[in-house]
C-alpha cells in the first residue's frame, strides 16, 4: 500500500504519537481523518496537515462511545469514499496504587483504552470487509508486555490491545480475508504530554523514564507498519531488549522493572497534586495540543544514549542479583 491518497483515520490525534502520526501521513500525501475530543486542537492540526500537502477532516470524537466511533467511520467514508488505514491510538491513564484509584477512573481507562479500540476495530472492519482490504494499527505499549506498578489499569488495557490483535488476526486468517491486516505497535517511553496529563494519586510527580524517544520515532514505525504490515513491532531498542528478556526470565524482569518505576518514573523529590488529569475531559487549549511533553526525546544526544546504556546496565545487574538468589 502507498501512503499517497490513502485514507487514514487516526484517533487520539490531537497530541503526542497521534499528532506525529497524522503529520507524517500528511507529508506523504495521505487523506487524514483526525479524531480526538477537543475540536479546537483538531482544527489546528487539520490546517497543518493541509499545509504539508495532505487532505484533512477533523471529527471530534470520544472513542469510549460506540455510536461516536461509528459516526467517525461514516464521515470518513462519506468524505473520501473508503478507509484504507485505521490507527487506534487514543488512550488515557493514571499513576496510583491500586487501592487508591477511584473505581470510576479505573472504568474510564478501560472504556477508552480497551472499548475505544474495540469500537475502532468494529467500525474499521465493517468498512474494510465491504471493500475487501485495509490495515488496522493498534497502538499498545511495552507495558502491554511488562506490566508496571502504579499503572494497573493502563497495563491491563495495553495487554488487552495485544490480545485483541492476536484474536482478530486469527479470525481474519480463518475467514480467508487476506486483504485485511491487523498490526500492533508497542512503543517504549515516548516524549508526549501523557505524563503531565494523566491522573495522579501518588502525590509524586510522574516522570518519563529514560531513555525517552521522540513521538516522531513512534509515528515513523506506525506509518511503516501500516504500509508494510507486520503483526507486532516494538518501538525503541531498549523496549525490544526488555520484551525479549521478559520472555526468558519474566519474574526477574518484572522485579527489576518495579524498582525502576518506583525510583525513576515517580519522583521522590517533586510532589504533585492529586488530580484526575485528562481522563474525563480534555485539558484546556495550550500545552495539551502539542506533540511532545518536554522530555527532550527528540534530541539524539550522547546524554540520551548514556541514559539508555545506564538503564540497560541497571537491568542486567538487577537480573544477575535476582537470578543469583534462586536455589540451584
Image (spheres, helix red, strand yellow):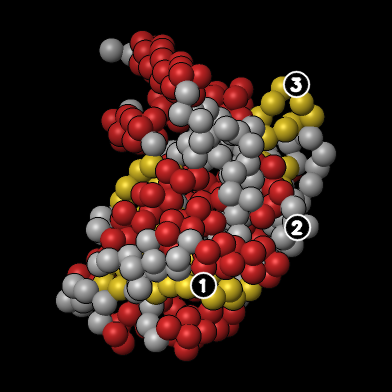
Q: Residues within 10 Å of mark 1 (few under 14, many from 20)?
A: many
For image coordinates 56% across by 40% down, the residue present is: 191
Locate residue 218 relative to residue 294 in the image: left or right.
Answer: left
Could you say which is closer to the camera, residue 45 or residue 119?
Answer: 45
Residue at mark 1 to residue at mark 2: CA–CA distance: 20 Å
Which mark identifies residue 56?
1
Element type where label 2 sits in the image:
loop
Nearer the N terminus, badge 1 or badge 2? 1
Could you say which is closer to the camera, residue 207 or residue 17?
Answer: 17
* Screen quadrant of the C terminus: top left
Q: Residues within 10 Å of mark 3 (few under 14, many from 20)?
A: few
Element type where label 1 sits in the image:
strand
Q: Residues within 10 Å of mark 2 (few under 14, many from 20)?
A: few
Identity of the residue furthest to the right in this view: 273
Which mark identifies residue 269?
3
Residue at mark 2 to residue at mark 3: CA–CA distance: 29 Å
For image coordinates 39% across by 36% down, the residue present is: 236
Amino acid at each position: 500500500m502507498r501512503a499517497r491518497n490513502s485514507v487514514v483515520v487516526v484517533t487520539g490525534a490531537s497530541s503526542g504519537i497521534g499528532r506525529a502520526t497524522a503529520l507524517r501521513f500528511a507529508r506523504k500525501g495521505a487523506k487524514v481523518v483526525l479524531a480526538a475530543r477537543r475540536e479546537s486542537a483538531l482544527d489546528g492540526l487539520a490546517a497543518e496537515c493541509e499545509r504539508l500537502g495532505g487532505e484533512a477532516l477533523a471529527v471530534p470524537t470520544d472513542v469510549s462511545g460506540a455510536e461516536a466511533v461509528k459516526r467517525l467511520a461514516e464521515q470518513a467514508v462519506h468524505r473520501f469514499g473508503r478507509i484504507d488505514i485505521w490507527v487506534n491510538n487514543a488512550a488515557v491513564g493514571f499513576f496510583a496504587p491500586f487501592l487508591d484509584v477511584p473505581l470510576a477512573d479505573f472504568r474510564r481507562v478501560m472504556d477508552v483504552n480497551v472499548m475505544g479500540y474495540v469500537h475502532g476495530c468494529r467500525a474499521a472492519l465493517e468498512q474494510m470487509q465491504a471493500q475487501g482490504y485495509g490495515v488496522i494499527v493498534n497502538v499498545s505499549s511495552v507495558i502491554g508486555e511488562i506490566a508496571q506498578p502504579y499503572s494497573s489499569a493502563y497495563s491491563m488495557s495495553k495487554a488487552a490491545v495485544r490480545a485483541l490483535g492476536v484474536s482478530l488476526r486469527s479470525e481474519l486468517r480463518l475467514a480467508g480475508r487476506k486483504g485485511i491486516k491487523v498490526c500492533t505497535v508497542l512503543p517504549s517511553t515516548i516524549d508526549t504530554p501523557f505524563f503531565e496529563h494523566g491522573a495522579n494519586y501518588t502525590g509524586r510527580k510522574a516522570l518519563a523514564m529514560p531513555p525517552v524517544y521522540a513521538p516522531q520515532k513512534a509515528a515513523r514505525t506506525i506509518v511503516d507498519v501500516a504500509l508494510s504490515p507486520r503483526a507486532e513491532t516494538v518501538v525503541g531498542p531498549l523496549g525490544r531488549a526488555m520484551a525479549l528478556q521478559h520472555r526468558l526470565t519474566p519474574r526477574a524482569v518484572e522485579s527489576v522493572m518495579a524498582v525502576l518505576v518506583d525510583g525513576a518514573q515517580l519522583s521522590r523529590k517533586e510532589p504533585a497534586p492529586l488530580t484526575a488529569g485528562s481522563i474525563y475531559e480534555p485539558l484546556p487549549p495550550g500545552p495539551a495540543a502539542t506533540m511532545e511533553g518536554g522530555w527532550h526525546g527528540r534530541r539524539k544526544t550522547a546524554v540520551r544514549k548514556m541514559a539508555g546504556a545506564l538503564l540497560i546496565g541497571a537491568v542486567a545487574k538487577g537480573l544477575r542479583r535476582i537470578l543469583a538468589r534462586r536455589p540451584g
